[in-house]
């Protein structure tokens, strides 16, 4: 093989190398970086919710064309060139890939008993993002240039199509010729944002519709989440992948869970790993105790298997990349073949690795830090190469980044175990190595797609590499704050209930070892987490007490004066507590399926704390699927995530199937019309790919994803307030008077009878049960009688505010007067439960909340589905014919 890879003289990009229009401009880089931040936030939301993202380059390119075109018309300025729009999509695509890597890896710190500190997330994001770019640059000529597919050319050898990159290039070329509009993306964004906010922000519609599958048993429930972003994901990934996810969901939630319930329904004893009898567990508790580990084992095994299947590609990829490193960038190199200077690439790589070693050395020994940096270099170069190659063959959406990450983490943990490195901080080191490799691999595939787009349109590689480095750097700076302050911190629960806090008081010598502090409700506490627990055990000349060694894993706030472990800190992401101490419910939206796998691997290998039986069952399911010739990764994700996510994604996939049937018929006609001409036939095949990847339906689905996800980020942030989410939900339920003095159960039955006068007895009982569940926490406390002269605590703590009732009143009236909200009576009851008594009956003037009918939420969601189908089939939002097609 020649050591030099030269451009094919027979290939001509859209903008020839002899031309040099405006390209690397400040406006293009700024616009790309800004759009990248939007898609980074939406991608982070998606990966925490369902463990997947979709490529952002095509919607970013469409938005760039539309925005610049609109600015040109509004302010009478020049239009952006096709190469400037290419710079926009290049810089903007980095946000999605970095968000995926960060969302998969960094929340695993919570599973290890640590907090997510901004500095660590930022450093890992920057180093991983930039390393992925630098490693990919020497591979460009081998993968993008030498393996370029040219329609109609014979004896091309091995080629890489890069489907998303090729489709994005066609979008940019179409925009330059006057076609392509971003109106569809904007409409999708606006509708999805509005629907998400009305559904989950104001709760005007039920977010999840559930239908019990009673003929199986009580554990079988079919449900779907009315989420526009999941509908868009399903449309973009297509029916095959969506159907595999749906298959996993059916197995997990309509087969395995019912079997577990059937086995344990009449067993009075707990079945490990459960801690109480199955008949006493809710469906979510059964899932968390059993199905979660089965799903995690399936996801981990499927990811590793998908990576192992690419081993032949690894060898070929390295052979190609080694030959390209020696290619120089002399003065006679055409503009379209000029890379960043190789000295910069090599020097930058060395600097990044050195900075990583320095960062790690701040927590571990220098030798251990160098070991971590060495592992990053080995696995980083290996998997960035594999990722770039696989992206060219199967596309970004099918790239098994999670499998590469799991493999990296597994091997790293085994090395650490062999070296006796099993402390909590060593576990964090192993995660940090995997996180950098994950982000680098994810970004490496994205860089490859962007460089392919640039190769086709005639972009300058060097400028594209600068642009994506700028986009990656800015996204890496911001993504940590989005993860910690917008998505995780606002919904964090602090609990001082005895069942959540270990009965432990630290000795003065132990307390002195805790260095980290946190402010909570105006008081400074010391933090005891996995790291600080190890510091306590490692105190000089100190033999750890048994209760210190066995303290319940987690993050706790410790009284700085007494050493009493006082408060459990339960984070939003993968949190376990469903209510605050005052009874306020907390909605947990982020299961982070692929993150949990990393935590299971680390704890299983280094802590030897893993339910291997359940994990092995999941692994065997993945093996069985692969033996049947089915790629197991999508199936495994469906088995792991809640069924309502998979159902919505499946609906989107079904819509895409119907649309693809139409495009397939058109493509077949075009290919048949090409006759025996191989060039025309190949060109028709490429055109079919372009239409499929850039159709109006895909653009609308991209808008759904961005709008729904950004609204989800906003709603998650609103959880910082205890009152704002409830205030926004003021119209969530209808109120119905009970009309007589009755216990809550009887009042619910009476209201259900009035609501369903012609309904069956079973339907009335079901509605009555829902009314009781909806009102039992907040309504009875509001009607607690407070006699005149009663002293009440209004705020917690020894010095909390007190209130003396001037006359006979109710606790709801006191809550309204002192706390501004009637529903906060439950909080006052918790503070004063020794002095007050909940009434056995509600007064006749009381009103109960009545849940919304599930069918009502189907109307707006059904309209979103119908619009997606209509746009995809070309019945609505049809753009004007492109000039290129007219000319053809």
Image (cartoon, rainbow, N blue to C red):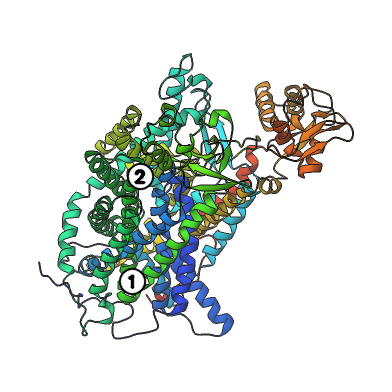
Give the class, few, some or many, for how many residues have Cα within 10 Å of label 2's Cα (few <14, many ≥20): some
* Residue 815: percent from left, percent from top: 78, 39
Relative to 296, is 186 above or below? below
The foreground one among 252 and 294 is: 294
In the rendered image, the quadrant that contains the C terminus is bottom left
Left or right? Give the position of 681 relative to 835.
left
Left or right? Give the position of 403 relative to 81.
left
The foreground one among 794 and 233 is: 794
Q: In this figure, which residue is indicated by the disc labeled 2? A: 425
* Marks 2,1: beta carbons within 8 A: no
* Residue 854: percent from left, percent from top: 63, 38
Extreme residue toward the right, this view? 807
SS at badge 1: helix
Q: Residue at x 30, y 72 (%)?
A: 455
Q: Residue at x 15, y 67 (%)?
A: 323
SS at badge 2: helix
Q: For residue 785, what is the image quadrant?
A: top right
Give the class, few, some or many, for how many residues have Cα within 10 Å of label 1's Cα (few <14, many ≥20): many
In the rendered image, the quadrant that contains the N terminus is bottom left
Relative to 4, is 620 above or below? above
* Residue 652: percent from left, percent from top: 47, 48
Total tally of numbered discs in the picture: 2
Relative to 407, is 544 above or below? above
The foreground one among 880 and 33 is: 33
Residue 697 visible (yes or no) = no
Q: Which mark is residue 491?
A: none
* Residue 184: percent from left, percent from top: 53, 64
Extreme residue toward the left, this view? 1
Q: Which mark is residue 465?
A: 1
Q: Residue at x 48, y 13 (%)?
A: 268
Left or right? Give the position of 823 relative to 96.
right
Q: State which tag comes first along the sequence, 2 or 1.
A: 2
């Amino acid at each position: 093989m020649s050591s030099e890879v030269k451009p094919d003289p027979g290939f001509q990009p859209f903008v020839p190398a002899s031309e040099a229009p405006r390209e690397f401009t400040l406006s293009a880089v700024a616009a790309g970086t800004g759009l990248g931040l939007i898609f980074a936030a939406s991608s982070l939301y998606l990966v925490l919710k369902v463990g997947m993202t979709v490529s952002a380059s095509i919607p970013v390119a469409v938005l760039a064309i539309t925005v610049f075109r609109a600015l040109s018309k509004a302010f009478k300025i020049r239009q952006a060139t096709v190469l400037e729009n290419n710079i926009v999509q290049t810089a903007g695509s980095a946000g999605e890939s970095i968000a995926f890597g960060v969302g998969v890896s960094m929340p695993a710190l919570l599973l290890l008993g640590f907090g997510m500190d901004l500095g660590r997330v930022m450093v890992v994001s920057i180093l991983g993002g930039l390393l992925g770019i630098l490693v990919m640059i020497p591979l460009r000529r081998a993968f993008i240039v030498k393996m370029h597919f040219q329609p109609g050319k014979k004896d091309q050898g091995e080629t890489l199509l890069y489907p998303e990159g090729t489709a994005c290039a066609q979008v940019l070329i179409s925009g330059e010729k006057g076609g392509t509009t971003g109106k569809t993306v904007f409409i999708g964004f606006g509708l999805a944002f509005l629907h998400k906010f009305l559904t989950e922000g104001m709760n005007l519609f039920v977010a999840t519709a559930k239908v019990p599958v009673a003929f199986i048993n009580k554990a079988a429930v079919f449900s779907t989440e009315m989420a526009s972003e999941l509908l868009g994901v399903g449309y973009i990934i297509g029916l095959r992948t969506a159907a595999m996810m749906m298959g996993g969901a059916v197995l997990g939630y309509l087969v395995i869970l019912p079997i577990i319930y059937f086995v344990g329904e009449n067993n009075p004893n707990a079945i490990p790993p459960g801690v109480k009898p199955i008949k006493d567990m809710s469906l979510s508790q059964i899932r968390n105790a059993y199905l979660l580990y089965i799903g995690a084992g399936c996801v981990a095994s499927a990811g590793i298997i998908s990576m192992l299947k690419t081993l032949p590609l690894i060898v070929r990829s390295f052979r190609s990349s080694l030959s390209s490193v020696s290619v120089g960038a002399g003065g006679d190199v055409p503009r379209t073949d000029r890379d960043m200077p190789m000295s910069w690439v090599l020097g930058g790589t060395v600097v990044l690795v050195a900075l990583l070693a320095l960062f790690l050395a701040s927590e571990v020994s220098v030798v251990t830090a160098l070991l971590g940096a060495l592992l990053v270099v080995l696995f980083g170069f290996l998997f960035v190469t594999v990722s770039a190659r696989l992206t060219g063959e199967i596309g970004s959406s099918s790239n098994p980044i999670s499998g590469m990450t799991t493999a990296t983490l597994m091997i790293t943990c085994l090395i650490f175990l062999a070296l006796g490195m099993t402390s909590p901080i060593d576990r964090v080191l192993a995660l940090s190595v995997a996180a950098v490799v994950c982000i680098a691999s994810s970004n490496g595939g994205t860089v490859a797609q962007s460089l392919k787009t640039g190769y086709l349109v005639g972009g300058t590689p060097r400028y594209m590499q600068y642009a994506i480095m700028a986009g990656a750097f800015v996204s890496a700076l911001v993504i940590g704050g989005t993860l910690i302050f917008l998505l995780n911190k606002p919904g964090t629960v602090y609990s001082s209930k005895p069942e959540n806090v270990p009965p432990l008081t630290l000795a003065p010598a132990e307390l002195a070892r805790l260095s980290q502090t946190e402010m909570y409700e105006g008081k400074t506490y010391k933090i005891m987490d996995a790291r600080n627990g190890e510091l306590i055990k490692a105190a000089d000349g100190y033999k750890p007490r048994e209760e210190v060694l066995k303290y319940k894993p987690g993050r706790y706030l410790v009284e700085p004066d007494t050493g009493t472990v006082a408060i459990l800190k339960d984070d939003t992401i993968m949190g376990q507590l469903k209510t605050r101490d005052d009874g306020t419910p907390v909605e947990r939206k982020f299961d982070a399926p692929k993150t949990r796998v990393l935590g299971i691997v680390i704890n299983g290998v280094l802590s030897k704390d893993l339910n291997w039986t359940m994990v092995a069952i999941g692994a065997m399911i993945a093996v069985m699927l692969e033996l049947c010739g089915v790629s197991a990764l999508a199936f495994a994700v469906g088995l792991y995530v809640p069924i309502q996510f998979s159902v919505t994604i499946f609906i989107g996939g079904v819509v895409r199937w119907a649309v693809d049937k139409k495009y397939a018929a058109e493509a077949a006609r075009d290919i048949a019309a090409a006759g025996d001409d191989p060039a025309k036939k190949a060109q028709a095949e490429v055109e079919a790919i372009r239409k499929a990847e850039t159709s109006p339906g895909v653009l609308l689905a991209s808008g759904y994803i961005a709008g729904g996800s950004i609204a989800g980020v906003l709603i998650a942030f609103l959880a910082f307030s205890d009152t704002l989410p409830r205030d926004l939900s003021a119209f969530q339920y209808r109120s119905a008077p009970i009309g007589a003095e009755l216990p809550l159960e009887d009042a619910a039955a009476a209201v259900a009878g009035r609501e369903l006068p012609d309904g069956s007895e079973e339907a009335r009982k079901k509605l009555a049960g829902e009314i009781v569940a909806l009102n039992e926490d907040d309504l009875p406390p509001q009607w607690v009688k407070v006699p005149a002269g009663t002293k009440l605590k209004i705020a917690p703590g020894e010095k909390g505010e007190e209130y003396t009732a001037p006359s006979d009143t109710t606790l709801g009236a006191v809550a309204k007067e002192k706390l501004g909200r009637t529903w906060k009576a439950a909080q006052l009851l918790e503070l004063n439960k020794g002095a007050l008594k909940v009434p056995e009956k509600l007064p006749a003037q009381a009103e109960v909340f009545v849940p919304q009918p599930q069918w009502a939420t189907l109307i707006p969601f059904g309209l979103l589905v119908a619009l997606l189908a209509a746009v995809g089939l070309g019945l609505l939002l049809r753009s004007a014919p492109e000039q290129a097609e007219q000319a053809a």
